[in-house]
Image (cartoon, grey):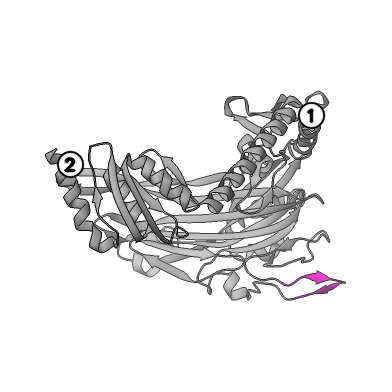
Amino acid sequence: MCKNIITLLFIILMLPMLSFGQVSKKSVSKVSFDFMDADIRNVLRVLTDISGKNIVLSDDVKGKITIKLDNVSWDEAMDIVIKNNDLAKIEEENVIRVVSAKKFGDEKEKDRKERLEFLKEKEMRQKLEEDFVQETVFINYVDVAEVEKVIRGDESKKVKGLLSANGSATVVKWTNALILKDTKENIDEIKKRIREHDVKPAQVQIEARIVQARSTFIRDLGVQWGARYASRVLGKDVELTGGRTAESSTGTTNTYTATTGQAGQRAGGFNYPYNVNLPAAVAEGSGGVLGIFIGSAADSLNVDVQLSALESDGKLKIISHPKIVTSDNKPAKINQGKQIPYQTVSQSGTQTQFADAVLGLEVTPQVTKDGNVRLKIKTTKDSADFDNLTVAGPTIDKREAVTEIIIKDGETAVIGGIYESTENWSDSGVPFLNKIPLLRWLFDREYKKREKSELLLFITPVILKNLYAEGDK
């Protein structure tokens, strides 16, 4: 009885704010109240406060209400208020949502349509999947992950794939295969597209000749530097692009970089300017910062003949003649050099370290449809400079050239301008007399001899045909 009195006092205190009459609650489950011209939103809030539940009122719930009820439960009272004011109640766990009857009907109709659409789509999907087949497609030469990307497409980039709306593709990495699930017609089309691109890559042999020669010998060979479609020894044409930039230095490493530049072209029998039109003085090493240039010479056979002849004349020395085979669009790397030991002192004692002095060549061939070869060439020349020693050891002079050229199968590109200087003490004199101690200074002479040589790389790509037997194709 005391609890009912406390509840009744709480409702009476709310009456001035809600502008309705006296409310009484005679028991825990029953209430009595008399509302007169009260705001319906406030009446609903009072009822939910009694119930202990949360309430969410839609914006279209509004108006005044006059009602008197005696000894009814709070939910019965709420149902009476909702029905008499054209409202609807939606209970979701511990929340009561009240909306207008019209909005409630619209929501039910929307839910009904969405459910129907879902059922129709599900029925269509089930019917379509009855026509689906599953097939495993093995990929021979292409990365299966790249194939899967093409088949799926990319919605973010608005790239349409090859699968149907409900088709799927699963990658099997260990067998380089795809498990396709789609209609038979679509799978046949996907397999056709795969066969068009999953082809055996061309094999390219990269033949390099590393030559040390007098700086003037290159004129004897007939090399044109930086040409694009420049006439060559055997009357063939070659497309070349390439340029160079200035020197930069960081820490104990000096770096020189060449980049692809603009070039002229040969058309209709007319030669346009070279992209690197180097004067003779620069070609001989007296000018220019980088000292690495790109040019062209005759085909491989003619180059071999001329190099052999010049080597016999003592004008050059063939240091190395490596060959390496690589696939189309795969890099081939060739390094020629040595490791120079030097000592460092630390708390652990004296240690021997090694500085790399390497001539590096990285070539990535790309066979074009017309049988030419596009070469991406990166050349590096690292040498230790013991005249500039630091605590960390000798400085490393680094030279690097990066360029792209297009040449015909079997023709030769030339990278030159890598100079090396040596100093030697020599003596000459009159035989016998230059051995007499007191007279030696009259008949003997010592002098410092400086020799400058140029390091050149001749690169010849050869497309390997008939590498595989017919049965392997």
User: Can see residue 13?
Assistant: yes
Q: Position of residue 458 (x, y in %)?
A: 65, 53
**Residue appearing at x 56%, y 68% in the figure:** 244
What is the quadrant of the N terminus in the image?
Answer: top left
**Residue appearing at x 37%, y 70% in the figure:** 442
* Disc 2 target residue: 4
Q: Which mark is residue 184?
A: 1
**Residue appearing at x 33%, y 63% in the figure:** 251
Asked whether 266 falls inside the magenta stretch, the response is yes
Extreme-right residue of the structure: 268
Q: Position of residue 291 (x, y in %)?
A: 54, 66
Range of residues picked out in magenta: 264-272
Q: Nearer the viewer, mark 1 or mark 2?
A: 2
**Labels in figure, total:** 2
Give the structural element (helix, strand or loop) at label 2.
Answer: helix
Q: Position of residue 263 (x, y in %)?
A: 69, 71
- Which one is earlier in the sequence, the residue at label 1 or at label 2? 2
The relative height of residue 36 versus residue 26 in the rendered view (above or below) is below
